């Protein structure tokens, strides 16, 4: 673009010759100086060094001098180029809107050039004053446009940054949601053996009962209706049990709530127990001591269910892999000052020192790839911290692992004051 402008400026020297009727060395000199001032801008965009800024100021000043000199050579105030002198600050403001000093420098050079050109012309004082005032007004307008353009650019940049920040937050939230969902499915996969056992038992006696009813109905003997009704009732119980297991699994895998609400820790534990029992029933004895009257917490109930279920399944995996005799998992809840504490403990081997220091690192796991992703405890800690809580791990003095969840108690809202029903001025009357 600069080389194109330079070619146009030099090319117009032919117009100067036609206008003057002869070759003018000074016109050529000023045009060459104008070209040099443009080429000084080469490589400046994107360069914020002090040297680049001074090159801008020299370029602007040299351009103003050359335009004023060319106007002088071409006839002064009556020259067709004189109109370019007062408009130079406007052009600078549009091209270099980020640099207010460049606009002010262009306005100063144009003002001085206008004074020189008007002062040397044969015009009245009113005409000279008009030109000077017009030049001052143009410089002020150029400065105003420069500041406005800078404000608009700043606002656009802030809008782009805000849009990028919002998109980043949305992408992060989507990523967190997908990570939580994948960890849920991983937990469901680890529950698969317990689920199969929990479903196979009722399926076995449901099938046996159906065979019994069919044989009774096709034997040709007199049917004992009470006995058949009892068998069908047992069958119905088995089917309901299967449906409940499937419903619990489906509900857990589809937990999508994201808004925190007041919830009871006892209810959270009860929800987690429904699924955890599928894993722990044949591995360890599960003991729960969570009072129902514990203070409420403010959290996403489904997320806490996922955290607790992950801790319980982990405990079951450890007890099973180490073949602990008389395995036991204990869940205890209690209130401590302004916090509610939930302990998940087992009587397994506990955490080795090198494992305890890295327990919450992403992708760190002591399990085989088919049994663990290394993200469960990391995600669990993040979910607890989202609600202002903390998840820590330690070893029990008597042996075994202990995971401690601390959550802040939901603030109790003060009761609304009932409006006073005493008649106005009643206190004064009693006095």
Image (spheres, grey):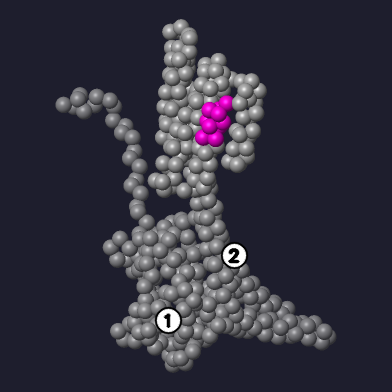
Q: Which residue is mark 2?
A: 254
Q: Residue at x 42, y 69 (%)?
A: 381
Q: Which residue is mark 1?
A: 329
The answer to whether residue 363 shows anywhere in this view is: yes
Residue 282 at x, y = what percent?
Answer: 52, 86
Residue 41 at x, y = what percent?
Answer: 51, 42
Residue 180 in magenta stretch: no
The magenta region covers 24-34
In this rendering, which labeled residue sits more in front, label 2 or label 1? Answer: 2
Of labels 2 and 1, earlier in sequence is 2
Residue 36 at x, y = what percent?
Answer: 52, 39
The answer to whether residue 26 is above or below residue 130 is below
Residue 31 in magenta stretch: yes
The answer to whether residue 76 is above or below residue 247 is above
Q: Residue at x 41, y 78 (%)?
A: 359
Q: CA distance from mark 2 to mark 1?
A: 27 Å
Residue 356 at x, y = what percent?
Answer: 37, 80
Q: Nearer the viewer, residue 144 or 60?
A: 60
């Amino acid at each position: 673009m600069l080389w194109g402008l330079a070619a146009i400026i030099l090319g117009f020297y032919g117009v100067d010759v036609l206008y003057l009727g002869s070759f003018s060395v000074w016109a050529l000199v000023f045009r060459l100086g104008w070209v040099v001032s443009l080429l000084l801008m080469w490589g400046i965009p994107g360069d914020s060094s002090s040297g680049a800024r001074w090159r801008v100021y020299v370029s602007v000043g040299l351009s103003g001098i050359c335009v004023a000199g060319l106007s002088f050579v071409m006839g002064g105030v009556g020259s067709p180029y004189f109109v370019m002198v007062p408009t130079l600050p406007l052009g600078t403001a549009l091209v270099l809107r980020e640099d207010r000093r460049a606009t002010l420098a262009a306005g100063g050079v144009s003002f001085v050039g206008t004074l020189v050109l008007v002062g040397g012309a044969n015009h009245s004082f009113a005409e000279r004053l008009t030109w000077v005032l017009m030049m001052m007004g143009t410089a002020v307008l150029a400065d105003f446009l420069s500041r406005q353009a800078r404000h608009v650019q700043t606002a656009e940049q802030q809008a782009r940054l805000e849009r990028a920040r919002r998109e980043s937050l949305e992408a992060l939230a989507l990523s967190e949601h997908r990570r939580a969902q994948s960890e849920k499915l991983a937990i469901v996969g680890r529950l698969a053996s317990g689920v199969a056992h929990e479903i196979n038992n009722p399926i076995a006696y449901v099938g046996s009962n159906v065979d019994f009813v069919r044989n009774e109905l096709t034997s040709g003997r007199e049917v004992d209706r009470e006995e058949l009704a009892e068998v069908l009732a047992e069958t119905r119980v088995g089917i309901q049990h299967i449906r409940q297991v499937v419903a619990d699994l489906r509900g857990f895998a589809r937990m999508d709530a994201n808004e925190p609400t007041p919830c009871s820790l006892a209810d959270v534990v009860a929800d987690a127990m429904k699924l955890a029992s599928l894993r722990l029933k044949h591995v360890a004895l599960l003991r729960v001591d969570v009072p129902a009257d514990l203070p409420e917490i403010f959290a996403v109930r489904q997320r806490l269910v996922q955290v607790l279920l992950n801790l319980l399944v982990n405990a079951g995996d450890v007890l099973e892999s180490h073949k602990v005799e008389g395995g036991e998992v204990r869940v205890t809840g209690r209130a401590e000052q302004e916090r509610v504490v939930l302990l998940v403990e087992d009587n397994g081997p506990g955490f080795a020192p090198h494992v305890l220091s890295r327990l919450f690192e992403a992708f760190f796991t002591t399990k085989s790839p088919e049994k663990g992703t290394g993200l469960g405890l990391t995600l669990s800690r993040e979910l607890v911290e989202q609600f202002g809580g903390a998840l820590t791990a330690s070893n029990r003095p008597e042996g075994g692992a202990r995971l401690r969840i601390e959550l802040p108690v939901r603030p109790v809202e003060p009761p609304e004051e009932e409006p006073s029903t005493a008649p106005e001025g009643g206190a004064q009357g009693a006095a």
